[in-house]
Amino acid sequence: MPIDKVTTFQRVKNAFSVLYGNKTGFAGFLILCFFLFIAVFGPFIKPYDIMDFGGAEDILRPPSFEHLLGTDDMGRDILGGLIAGSRISLLVGVMATVLSMFLGAAIGLGAGYFGGFIDAVLMRLTDIFLVLPWLPLVLVLAAILGANLWNIILVIGLTSWAGTARVVRAQTLSVKERTYVERARSLGSSNLRVILRHILPNVFPVIFANTVLIAAVAILSETTLSFLGLGDSLNQSWGMMLHYAFECGAASIGAYWFLLPPGICVVLVVLGFTFLGYALDEWINPQIRKR
Amino acid sequence: MLMRNPRASQQAIQKAKEFYGLDQSLPVQFGRYLQDLLKLDFGVSFMFKKPVTEVIGGKVGPTLLLLGVSEIMAIVLGIYLGIVAASHRGKIVDIGTISVSLLLYSLPTFLLGMVLILIFSVYWGLFPSTGMVTAAARYATLWRQFLDLLSHLFLPAITLALTLIGEYGMLMRSSLLEVLSEDFIVTARAKGLREREVIRKHGYPNALLPVVTAISINLGLTIAGAIQVETVFSWPGIGRLMYDALNNRDYPLLQGIFLLVCICVIVANLFSDLLYMVLDPRVKS
Amino acid sequence: MSTPLLEVRDLKTHFHTKEGIAKAVDGISFEVYEGASFGFVGESGCGKTTAALSIIKLLPENGKIEGGQVLFRGEDLAAKSDEEIRLRRWKDISIIFQGAMNSLNPVMKISKQITEAIRLHEDISIPESRKRVKGLFTQVGLNPALLDQYPHEFSGGMKQRVMIALALACNPLLVIGDEPTTALDVMVQAQILDLLEDLRRSLHLATILISHDLSVIFDACERLAVMYSGKIVEMGNSREVYTRPAHPYTRKLVAAFPDLELEKQRKTGKRTLGKSIAGDPPNPLDRISGCKFHPRCEWADKRCSEEDPVSMEIGADHHVFCWKWDKIG
């Protein structure tokens, strides 16, 4: 059905890598390390309590010595919220990505390896998930399942595997043709064995590079979902902070300190994953050097 | 929950259940739903207590307006940007374009919208931040009314357009660079055409082909963006409706919108496939 | 003989790459007379295509003519501005690329691609130019009714005929054929070469053919030049060079080439492989002192590694660039 083409994601990546090379990959890695550190150790350095409401005069105060990034609409410290939120955002992003990766890899490997009817069915399924507009789909699913952390992870994972599946399938098909696979099969190895021992190791690099990029998308997805009201109010990610910022009209009031910090964090993490993903992809696919 | 009245009597609850068909078993409900679909009956909205089709109908217009204007802006500006970047490959303009595209890609649309509100609405006071028209305003002329609409349309349309410009720009850039390295470009130069003419007559038509398909491929992204933009700017369209339905757990409405969107996406894809067949003589039906 | 139509003197074309300057064409001189057929033969990368493209200054952005003259009917094309050259292209000199490849715009009708060339250089109406296209089609053996089709609807051989028709559109004096038969199968190759020869005679065209395939050049060109690493190593009448190859490289080429009965080979399409030449062609970025071929030459001596050979006349219309040509067994 759809005409095969290089996705824009790949075009930006190719153009970018040619220009900047691996320096940005390393920068991305550093950014992610930074946020990982914050997520793991931050709450110990600066503890944050969701219930730590301020008094009426503390609501939406701009940055000051006491509150380095100001306060939110409930009088809570924004910097603290940011640090605590990093755990949630990263957790959801990573776990959803892992789920997506497993699904995508499994389906891609199965379709590519078995071919025939199984391939046709799985590919049609993949096509469906590629064509369906993701946000409406995700919204409906999340609405039905309910808004908490695990459901969000599930929903994002269940809807973002299609791209990975396609890429994995293509790689599986090319690996399948190689002679040692034929040999293993003629020797009588079971299908599972062949897949795990011969095909998977060769497909894994592609899976990994793809996965890092999916992580970027997952973080964006979680942020958007939370913003639209499907986040977990007990575990507040950056997206949820943005949701509350919107709900209280921070933008219209000019309370930039509520709006920008979580936003910038999201953008930085996404860029971090993206840079790293580009660099990994370049490293793994040196032949694919388009403009 | 539906009735918002925790003290409703059992009888009233039972009546409500019957009305919405919630007293039947799930398979029966699903079967009923499909049946109704064929009759183009999408059910009744919980929130509005009106048929879903009616509720959606009123909101399609504003969304189409927003999408239309944004797409046109994005296509025109994106293609132009792609051409400029390709012509100055490796130089600042090009690097800038790629970097900005990357940034726009990493930015959630709603965040971009809110930032634009901060800058243009709050600090500079140039544009209104919500709604499609100024509420309860009367204008002397139709022209004034039109201008009011435009001022409300500007920020949401720019936000959505910016999300897409990165896509189209990068696409046009790489497509053009690829085309310009083909052999037939050398042939065109050998014939004695000016470089400008070579690019215009032989480069662009070939380079634009992938952009045509991209527009429909990107529909998912566009819709996601529209939902966010309408929410942030309180634009009275389908996207905003979906947001409201979501927060109020209005399932029939949610489902109805979802179905509508899916159908539109499929139709748009078909249409663009057909369009591509017309534009590219190499593709046969 | 009268003055040559095209006289190239000490042409040098260099490419400026990130890794340094590549001397693709390093000082070559040759002549092509009106209505005559000339050929360039050599391995891939020896500079023959660059030499041809330099004539009409059709070089990529990093390529530049660094020296020498390209005298076409007395005027030096190398000294002319890009704009002046542009007006001459196609009208005086046209070029045939490998039509089987992507040398034609895939989304433009063939007729339009040819009328575009015609109307660029002549003030003529569209219907008139279309009539001419039909005539050209007939001349090259294509059905005139097909003129409004797209390139992908033609086979490889037919596309090459289209390229020839296109090249003849403005009645040029010189037609350059850059690997015109590569990528075609042998039977079609023969047809195309015959067609080119017929057209040359009937239209009194001068042709320059470029190929890595010796059979094509020896067969189709009256005179030829053997190129190696940006330089001409031997030049002259084809029969002469073929029967009495002087340069070591030429000798090896001819020996590697199965020589018996070219005619018979063309008809049956069969060919057997001969001996190959040891070593690889040098990288144009490397600087080799003296004769460029000396690292691969079994007769090379000290002088060969130091001094660049000059042109030596060894027969009527037969020149060689080698210090040891008469010492080789």
Image: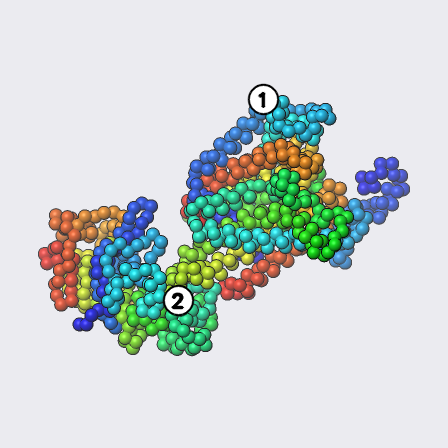
- Residue A17 lies in quadrant: top left
- Residue at x-position 51% and y-position 53%: B80
Outermost residue to the front = B140
Q: Where residue B21 sits: x, y (%)?
A: 81, 48
Q: Where residue A81 sits: x, y (%)?
A: 63, 28
Q: Where residue C187 sits: x, y (%)?
A: 33, 69
- Residue at x-position 13% and y-position 60%: C312
Q: Is residue C289 visible?
A: yes
Answer with left or right where residue A266 lies relative to residue A49.
left
Q: Callout 2: 10 Å neighbours few (<14), some, many (20+)?
A: many
Answer with left or right where residue B186 lies relative to residue B85.
left
Pick the quarter of the image with the N terminus of chain A: bottom right
Q: Which numbered disc covers residue C156?
A: 2
Q: Amino acid at mark 1?
A: Ile
| Figure label count | 2
Q: Nearer the viewer, residue A33 or B26?
A: A33
Q: Amino acid at mark 2?
A: Gly
The local secondary structure at tag 1 comes to: helix
Q: Nearer the viewer, residue B162 or C40?
A: B162
- Residue at x-position 40% and y-position 73%: C123
Question: Where is A247 relative to C250, above or below?
Answer: above
Q: Which residue is mark 1?
A: A45
Q: Which numbered disc covers residue A99?
A: none
Which chain letter matches label 1? A
- Residue at x-position 25% and y-position 68%: C73
Of badges 2 and 1, the one in the foreground is 1
